[in-house]
Image (cartoon, rainbow, N blue to C red):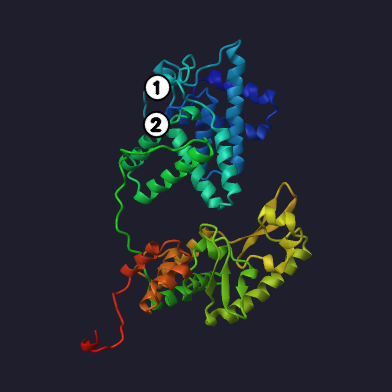
Amino acid sequence: MITGPDALWRKFDARLAARNVPQGEQDGYRKWLRTYLDFCHKYRHPYASAGSLPPFLAKLASKRQTESRRRQAEAAVRLYHGMLEESSGGGETPDPHPAPAQEIREESPAREVPPSFSPRRRPASGGGASWREQFEALANTIKLRHYSPSTLRTYTMWVRKFQTFTKSKVPASLSTDDVKEFLTDLAVRRGVAASTQNQAFNALLFFFRHALGREFGKVDGVVRAKRRRYIPVVLSREEIDRIIEHLEPPFDLIVKLLFGCGLRISECLDLRVKCFNLNSAVLTIYDGKGMKDRTVPLPQILLPEIRTRFRELAALRQDDLAKGYAGAFLPPQLEKRYKNAPKGFVWQWFFPAKRLTHVVKEHEYRRYHLQPSHVNKALRVAVQQAAIPKQVSPHTFRHSFASHLLQANYDIRTIQELLGHSDVRTTMIYKRTVPSRTEKERRSPLDF
């Protein structure tokens, strides 16, 4: 990591003292500034431009840095940029990448400093622009359309990668050629899968239409990632039972619902008490993929276990209310309409998180549902203990649900409805997971 000259840090330390940054946080500010300068050096970003900050924060987010650390990193970089702005009118700010090679101290092997990092050189034409307004427009449009938070995270991630690829080009000057180069780079240099390249394309298509306010244009000449013929992994009933035997509550019930109802992991963890109709043995999935609702039959064998779960949830709710907790998280628009709904039993999560979440703005504690990472970890251990020689994920049980129904001679349209697929061609993939079998009424050839 590049450390820079002592004069730079003396000036930065004086800046920290002048802004009354607590002594205990100053080491953190210095560390983040070193990280930022090294990031600019490595990815060819102009260190003096505010446009280098968004891709830097995106990089920290991709490294799973906590929100508090990202805020501290942003504060350190903004403090540094303010120091540069003040010095540009009077005194001289030391160059973090001085010209003489002897003045650069690196922990890694020496590398040539690109000329774009000289403080006397202006950023390349069209680079270093801020995309803040465009990111806000993207987020607002996604929320307006009630898309899932995961869609917002995925689209934002791809737009940030696109911003880094174009070196923060002025948004108004972005063109279809930039998109072509980016998509080609994904396929050629990074070797991504076809589904990943398509996901990036869809994100940029949405960004151009709804954040930049113009049509995408025709995209030709893009090197497409090779689409391979995918056959889902399917478990036998014996293998599923062995995995469930090695799972502890509530993860065993999660897997039973994944396989017994053909749920996605997000749909399963989003279940609330109101989703279950035990009298009719029907489960309703609200706001599934594509904002679609559907119903599926509940396995009769699970009804006693679900009733026991209800009693446990009722006791947990009473305990939360006695301690003054604010209940479960609800969509903001729903909570505005029904103020007491978060404390109502029907709105409680069916798989609540063990720990409460502190809502800083409201000065209250609320309960969220289990995270997919918790299920993945428990499932990974159970698969190892059960000695299943297959790559198993939560989605494997959804594949197994469809394949077992097809093997039981259910028609493909019924399976499509139970899975919530918009197109029957998506469901047809399960034709490859089971042996082909056709049952017809016995008739004489004379009657044909």
From this view, report whether residue 428 is shown above or below residue 302: above
Residue 193 as seen in the image, left or right of residue 88: left
Relative depth, front residue between 86 and 122: 122
Give the residue pinned by disc 2. Answer: 108
> Label 1 crowding class (10 Å Cα cut-off): few <14, some 14-19, many 20+?
few
Q: Residues within 10 Å of mark 2 (few under 14, many from 20)?
A: few
Mark number, residue 337: none
Amino acid found under the numbered disc labelled 2: Ser
Q: Nearer the viewer, mark 2 or mark 1?
A: 1
Q: Amino acid at mark 1?
A: Pro
- Quick one: SS at disc 1? loop
Residue 426's x, y, as percent? 39, 62
Q: Residue at x 42, y 16 (%)?
A: 99
Q: Is residue 402 above or below residue 17?
A: below
Residue 114: which numbered mark, if any?
Answer: 1
- Asked where in the image residue 53 lies, by quadrant, the reply is top right
